[in-house]
Amino acid sequence: MKKTFVIIMMVFSIPLMISAQGLTSKNGVPILPEEGEWCLGIDAVPFFVYMGNFFNGNQGNGAPDFDFTGAYPMTLYVKHFKSPTWAMRGKLRISYDAFTDKEFVIQDATTVNPDNMVEDKAKRTSMDIVLGAGAEMRRGKGRLQGVYGAEALFMFGADKNKFEYGNTWNPDISHHVTNFGDNILEEYEGIVTEDKSGTTLGFSIRAFVGAEYFFAPKISVGGEFGWGPAIMSEGKGTMTYEFVDYNQSTGDTFINSRTVETGGESQFGFYMDNLSGAINLLFYF
């Protein structure tokens, strides 16, 4: 416990020890960005979550990583400094989720063993991509630098749900089909096999303001917030479902499949956002 406390205190004291040195390192390396330099930035939230887990009493917390997930949608950005006080910048954020839910239900028409089970499966995937470009200005005479500017953002997203069933659909024994929450259609007396949303496109122009603190030469932590108009549009999607159909000629019933369009939507407004991550880690070279 003492060792852990000492390590934590050392980590948090590094910025304070370095801040007493001035704006160059021991070897005379400038700490702040210079004309012609590039910057690579990443979202530092996973690392701060990992450090916070030291205090939650859990054991076996996994090491931080930079996976492109919905929980931690990675933001990557690059800057090119035209002068020490302004830079052109680009941004890429990718979020991807793939989730599979497997459930067991009783097999229909089992004569050998009434306890036989079959598997129902729901596969859900979603992806969101944000691309941005803009200009950044900064001011400040010390390690703490204020940043501000404007940028344009383009957004793309898509979602898909796919369902597989161990039993053939029969509304009379619907309890032998898993209800995943959005796969049973009472109005059609059917079950969904695939549901694809329309492509979501968005565009935004935002002004942003934030700050960076250079705790080491050419390395800083920072964050920013933005505000501006945004428009989002979701196109039409498709849904495929199975249902019990009736053959009027023979009087027999059979399982049929049908694909229908689903409606889209649009949205416009002015939003306060934080597409750069709550805390960023930036490297200048």
Image: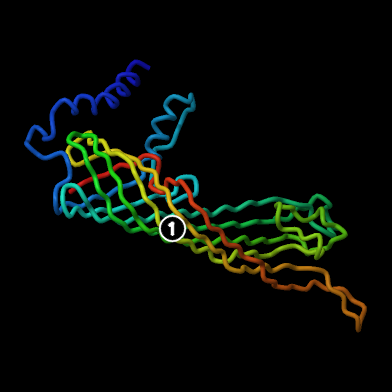
Q: Secondary structure at mark 1?
A: strand
Q: Which residue is nearer to you in this view: 183 or 197?
A: 197
Three-letter amino acid code of the residue under disc 1: Ser
**Residue 98 x, y percent position in the rendering:** 54, 54
**Residue 134 x, y percent position in the rendering:** 31, 57
**Residue 164 x, y percent position in the rendering:** 68, 61
Quarter occupied by residue 212: top left
Check the image and report above or below for 170 versus 81.
below
Which residue in the structure is indicated by mark 1?
Answer: 204
Residue drawn at point x = 83 percent, y = 63 percent: 170
Residue drawn at point x = 24 percent, y = 44 percent: 138
Residue drawn at point x = 80 percent, y = 49 percent: 115
**Residue 229 x, y percent position in the rendering:** 46, 55
Residue drawn at point x = 30 percent, y = 48 percent: 41
Task: Locate residue 113 relative to residue 162 in the image: left or right.
Answer: right
Check the image and report above or below for 221 versus 176.
above
Q: Which residue is nearer to you in this view: 63 or 35?
A: 35
Count of marks overlaid on the render: 1
Q: Which residue is nearer to you in this view: 179 or 131?
A: 131
Say how the picture is coloured. Answer: rainbow
Residue at the outermost left position:
28
Residue at the outermost top position:
2
Quarter occupied by residue 205: bottom left
Q: Quadrant of the N terminus?
A: top left
Check the image and report above or below for 97 versus 22.
below
Q: Residues within 10 Å of mark 1 (few under 14, many from 20)?
A: many
